[in-house]
Amino acid sequence: MRYDLAKLGIEKDLQYECITTTLSRDGVKNAGAFSFIYLGDDRVHCHIFEGSKTLKNILDTNEYVVNITQDPLVFTYATLDCLGDEYYTTDSDIAIIKDTQAYIIVDVENIKIRTPENFPIKGDSSIYFIDGKIREVVVNDETAQAYNRGMSGLIEGLVNFGRYKIVDDAKRKEYMDRLIENQRVIEKVSDEKTKKAMADLRAEYEKN
């Protein structure tokens, strides 16, 4: 089955930040802030480092939910592993964030274990590459848009640009280093317009 995720601001092969919710074998709900990639039609992908509750639940149940939200508290508490029961719906057979703008239920179809040698974060933990098939897409708010973190990096670069001309050399290097790192992220996760905007911005930085 084909799904049109464009209405959620989701483009094929780009990476979006979301809240992944899962249910343990014992029925305990869990949330984690992870990214996912839409592969087209009804296919999605995510990768998760070993050791998280989210990964354990996915391995046990072969399903997860992608919650489309930009609620700062939900992102923070999910990351800190302290999202309370009051943030979930009352469903007992699935974990869904209450009042989430939209959500995607995913059935896991294939899992591969990789080493993190090609990732910016190096370590001993393996990475699980998880391919899945969309079971259902529910839109509760027609204005729902998935969050792509490239925009945050671009905005940071724009904010710092006005300061870049007037600070000392040490601070200029700090701003440039942050710009370069944000550009690296944008090249990996963002659309062509955001990539061009960042490239144009960097060119202006380098003139000064």
Image (tube, rainbow, N blue to C red):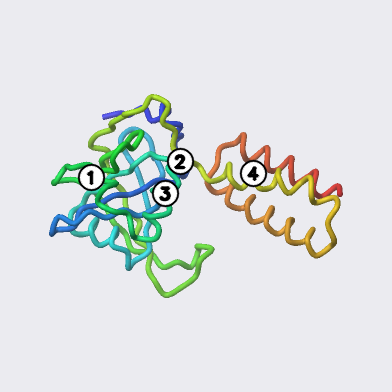
Quick one: label 2, few (<14), some, or many (20+) residues within 10 Å?
some
Disc nearer the start of the sequence (3/4): 3
Question: Circle 4 is placed at which residue position?
Answer: 154
Q: CA distance from mark 1 to mark 2?
A: 19 Å
CB under 8 Å between discs 3 and 2: no
Disc nearer the start of the sequence (1/2): 2
Q: Residue at x 61, y 53 (%)?
A: 184
Foreground label between 3 and 4: 3
Question: Circle 2 is placed at which residue position?
Answer: 13
| Callout 1 amino acid | Asp
- Judge left or right: residue 174 versus residue 55: right
Q: CA distance from mark 3 to mark 4?
A: 23 Å
| Callout 3 amino acid | Leu
Q: Which mark is residue 107?
A: 1
Q: Residue 48: x, y in percent?
A: 37, 59
Disc nearer the start of the sequence (3/2): 2
Q: Residue at x 29, y 46 (%)?
A: 87
Residue 116, above or below 199: below
Disc nearer the start of the sequence (2/4): 2
User: Considering the numbered disc 2 on the image, is that residue within a helix, a strand or a loop?
Assistant: loop
Q: Residue 96: x, y in percent?
A: 26, 43
Q: CA distance from mark 3 to mark 2?
A: 27 Å
> Residue 77 appears in which quarter of the rendering?
bottom left
Disc nearer the start of the sequence (1/4): 1
User: Considering the numbered disc 3 on the image, is that residue within a helix, a strand or a loop?
Assistant: helix
Foreground label between 2 and 4: 4
- Judge left or right: residue 99 versus residue 180: left
Question: Circle 3 is placed at which residue position?
Answer: 73
User: Considering the numbered disc 1 on the image, is that residue within a helix, a strand or a loop?
Assistant: strand
Q: Which mark is residue 38?
A: none
Q: CA distance from mark 1 to mark 4?
A: 34 Å
